[in-house]
Amino acid sequence: MLSLKMTEMWTTMGSTLASLMFIWAIIRQYCPYQLLRFFEKYSHRIMDYFYPYIRISFHEFLGDRLKRSDAYGAVEAYLSANTSKSAKRLKAEIGKDSTNLVLTMDEYERVTDDYKGVKVYWVCSKVMSNSRSMPYYQEQEKRFYKLTFHKKYRDTITGSYLDHVMKEGKEIRLRNRQRKLYTNSPGYKWPSYKQTMWSHIVFEHPATFETMAMEPEKKKEIIEDLVTFSKSKDFYARIGKAWKRGYLLFGPPGTGKSTMIAAMANLLGYDVYDLELTAVKDNTELRKLLIETTSKSIIVIEDIDCSLDLTGQRKKKGESKFFSDDENENKVNIDVLRKEVKEEGSGGGNSKVTLSGLLNFIDGIWSACGGERLIVFTTNYVEKLDPALIRRGRMDKHIELSYCSFNGFKVLANNYLRVENHVLFDSIEKLIGEVKITPADVAENLMPKSPMDDADKCLSNLIEALEEMKQSSKIKEQDDEVEHIVAIKENGEFVDDDADDDKEIDQEMKQIQR
Ligand SMILES: Nc1ncnc2c1ncn2[C@@H]1O[C@H](COP(=O)(O)OP(=O)(O)OP(=O)(O)O)[C@@H](O)[C@H]1O
């Protein structure tokens, strides 16, 4: 009897539910959109009134997905360290130095956390959405973490618990961070389904300041400058300046400009963004690239003189209708500001980045976002650059990397051969003072060419190379002198009817030729 009544009850409930669902489906189909929204809104409110839990979402990308949310990253790191033991489905990723695995919660996994006796729930989730900002409608994954807790703990959770999660999460991120080397890939078509305009690989360059061949005092000065910068957050805030610093590294090829950037990144634990300016379409794209860089990073533009037509040719005073004659010396003329990159000599790209765009990139209003950033330019021809681009305040520190000194050589000898002293050092010291040799060339000569090559052999190779260089530079000097004298004769400079002068020159030439 009882079972019959139960069966009847289930049947009635089932058919009522089916009718309700049918009515709801009809309403959804034929009800006007506004009315539907109205129903949904109020049904949520009613449910929320009875539902005793509060939910907070941490989305990976906020707004128009310009930048990955720091809060999302901090939550991810915090949960990875604190709750991965209780989660049942995890994702594994190679961590710092490619040695350990970092485990994070997998999608739709739910874990609990205890804070001062309060139990909270975290869920890792994602939704698919159509992005209207894309040229062709594409489904995008939008990931987020959802925190749920009882409403009676609102103050504890929104106050100290979230602070605790953010603080600990950021510290864990820094500790576990695998540093990256980013590049703006030339074939990139913005915007696309890709989450970022930068592509990256793990940054694993072994260069350090200890292995760099340069004068010890100069090295010390640069290290101190970098360390002071990295600890100056409060100072920059106090003086009202964005927390960033520009470095200009200049010098002949092979003197260690790129090596120094790697040493800087290793010293401070920063990521490196290697910006290929000729692959940047225009100023707008340059700005977007800037926004997508993170803090604790070095943005590098190598060979800046080849990247843009920044040769510093400004209009003469009075030519511009925009600036008065007494315009500030450092102000860039409007014609230069608006000059577009010439395709020729700019790497063959179709870049329309202007000097103005680049100046804005360095110290415009957008450059302040993120903070703790170094901008490094390298060039072999510092004199080719527009003074506005490298003036102090933009490029705060100018570092010249030059030919190898004896001190530099000793660092390289120690790196390559593990020798701190040797009988051949005296000859090398003498020769290195007489010829211009780059650290790259010294390094190449110190490199053992066969397994049998020991320190003696490598140092002898270097001496041989130095002597050859000395000899050829002597010959070159003489050739130059002869050329100079010939030019004087041909141009008739200093040459008058006085035959004595001619004789003097002839004698000098004979002497040189001998
Ligand atoms: N000062 C230095 N200390 C140690 N090694 C150096 C130094 N300079 C050059 N080298 C060695 O020479 C190689 C080339 O150096 P690097 O690429 O840093 O020079 P560069 O000045 O950036 O040259 P380019 O202007 O052609 O880009 C490096 O791999 C490094 O091994």
Image (cartoon, rainbow, N blue to C red):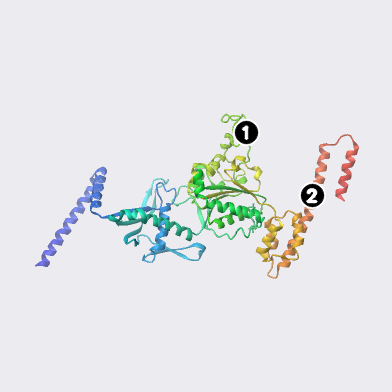
154 in relation to 342, above or below = below
Instruction: Report which residue position mark 2 lands on.
Output: 477
Residue type for callout 2 = Glu
Label 1: state its secondary structure: loop
Q: Is residue 370 visible?
A: yes
> Ligand 1 closer than 8 Å to the CB at disc 2?
no
Label 2: state its secondary structure: helix
Residue placed most toward the observer, 124 or 121: 121
Question: Is label 1 in contact with label 2 (beta carbons under 8 Å)?
Answer: no
Q: Which residue lies at the image location 9% right of the left edge and 67% below the top edge?
A: 1
The x, y position of residue 477, in whole percent, is: 79, 49
296 in relation to 386, above or below = below
Marks 1/2: CA–CA distance: 38 Å
Q: Residue furthest bottom?
A: 452
Q: Is 86 positioned to the left or the right of 447 in the image?
A: left
Q: Residues within 10 Å of mark 1 (few under 14, many from 20)?
A: few
Among numbered discs 1 and 2, the one appearing first in the sequence: 1
Q: Quadrant of ligand 1?
A: bottom right
Q: Is 204 positioned to the left or the right of 111 in the image?
A: right
424 in relation to 240, above or below = below
Residue placed most toward the observer, 347 or 45: 45
